[in-house]
Image (tube, helix red, strand yellow):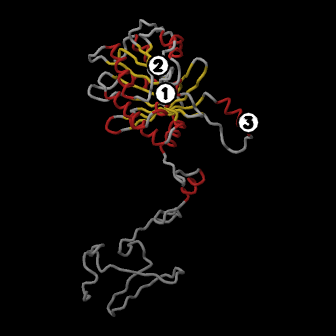
Amino acid sequence: MADSIFRKLRDGGEEGELAPALTIEETVASPFGLDVSGYLLANLSSSILAGKSKSQGLVLITFSRSPSFYLQFLKQKGITVSSSSKWIRVLDCYTDPLGWFDEPSSGSNKGSSLIKLHKCVSALKRLFSSIIEAGRELVGDGKTRFCVAMDSVNELLRHSSMTLVSGLLTDLRSHAQVSGLFWSLNTDLHQEKVTNALEYVSTMKANLEPLCPSSDGKKNALESLFSVHQDFGKGRIHVRFKLRKGRVRVMSEEYHVDHMGINFSPISSADTVIATTKSLLPKVQFNLQLSEKERVDKEKVVLPFEHQGNGKSIDIYDGRRSLLDGKIEAAPLSSGELQTDVVSSGKDGEIIYFRDSDDENPDSDEDPDDDLDI
């Protein structure tokens, strides 16, 4: 599933369509959005160097970590980045995000063609221009495209409004030379309307869910703390793909974070269905699913028109006397009175009806009230 996200970003959108965009949602309980971003960054860099990507360049905007961290990270993955590299540019929004320093730091001067210092991240129009300019330095002004990677938008939302940030992301998606972009977001730091706005802008959403211990109320605090510590770094990632014609596809995988990075593995189909169903159910005050006992009790309920299975034949009365029932016979109606020989069944009373003839339709169209002055 993580490979599906990578392929979407690597292949980009069709001509005339907006570029695919990914929101990686993390929480305090599962703070591994930057690990997923690093996974995508390493794979996109490898595909660009191998010539297997539609984009021929990558613009990395750093907000939460320094550019040197990502250069060292790529080096650990076997990807060497130097000042003469013609496929990547790093826009440094980490060193001086508010523009307080008059002179750039020594780390930003080193390899200036590779790393460019960007001050005052609240000026989003200037940030947009800097991203496009960095991309055009890699691919030129033609139809060749480049990919944009933001390690986090939390800092942008700290200094700018939700409307301006979503507008920046939409402008990047709409640019003809941008093939795809992705960013991470900590949903615990923002209101729900901010999260919904960024989800609306994106075509893919990856939600990181921690592997929570069982909450049966029988574990003491020490055992629960041990379970949390043992399972920290493990969890599930649920990805929602927005497809054409309004369709949505949801996929899930397990992840595990160690000193080598983040790894993904498939989960069983039954667990996937349960996890997907729970994530799609609305939050209401009543149960939408039956328990096992409720399901068994429901199966035992006998419907009023269902055959009880008592050994007797099923007789459906059609308005005529049964030809097989010889217990009830009608006497001639010469005296105008109905005479029947009824075998007592132990009941207080019963209604006996005989049709006038077999030619009479079971459902007559005649108005039973036509003799009334209505």
Mark 3 / mark 2, whichever is N-terminal: 2
Residue at mark 1:
152
Instruction: Please determine whether, in this image, residue 228 is positioned above or below residue 323.
Output: above
Q: Residues within 10 Å of mark 3 (few under 14, many from 20)?
A: few
For the residue pair 351 and 64, the one nearer the viewer reads as 64
Nearer mark to the viewer, of 3 and 2: 2
Q: Residue at x 57, y 54 (%)?
A: 296
For the residue pair 189 and 124, the one nearer the viewer reads as 124
Marks 3/2: CA–CA distance: 43 Å
Q: Is residue 53 left or right of residue 365?
A: right
Residue at mark 2:
92
Instruction: Please determine whether, in this image, residue 233 is positioned above or below residue 113.
Output: below
Marks 1/2: CA–CA distance: 13 Å
Nearer mark to the viewer, of 1 and 2: 2
Q: Residue at x 61, y 27 (%)?
A: 233
Residue at mark 3:
223
Q: Secondary structure at mark 3?
A: helix
Q: Amino acid at mark 3?
A: Glu
Q: Amino acid at mark 2?
A: Asp
Nearer mark to the viewer, of 1 and 3: 1
Query: Residue 323: percent from the left, percent from the top?
Result: 38, 72
Q: Residue at x 45, y 22 (%)?
A: 119
For the residue pair 315 and 143, the one nearer the viewer reads as 143
Mark 1 / mark 3, whichever is N-terminal: 1
Q: Secondary structure at mark 1?
A: loop
Q: Amino acid at mark 1?
A: Ser
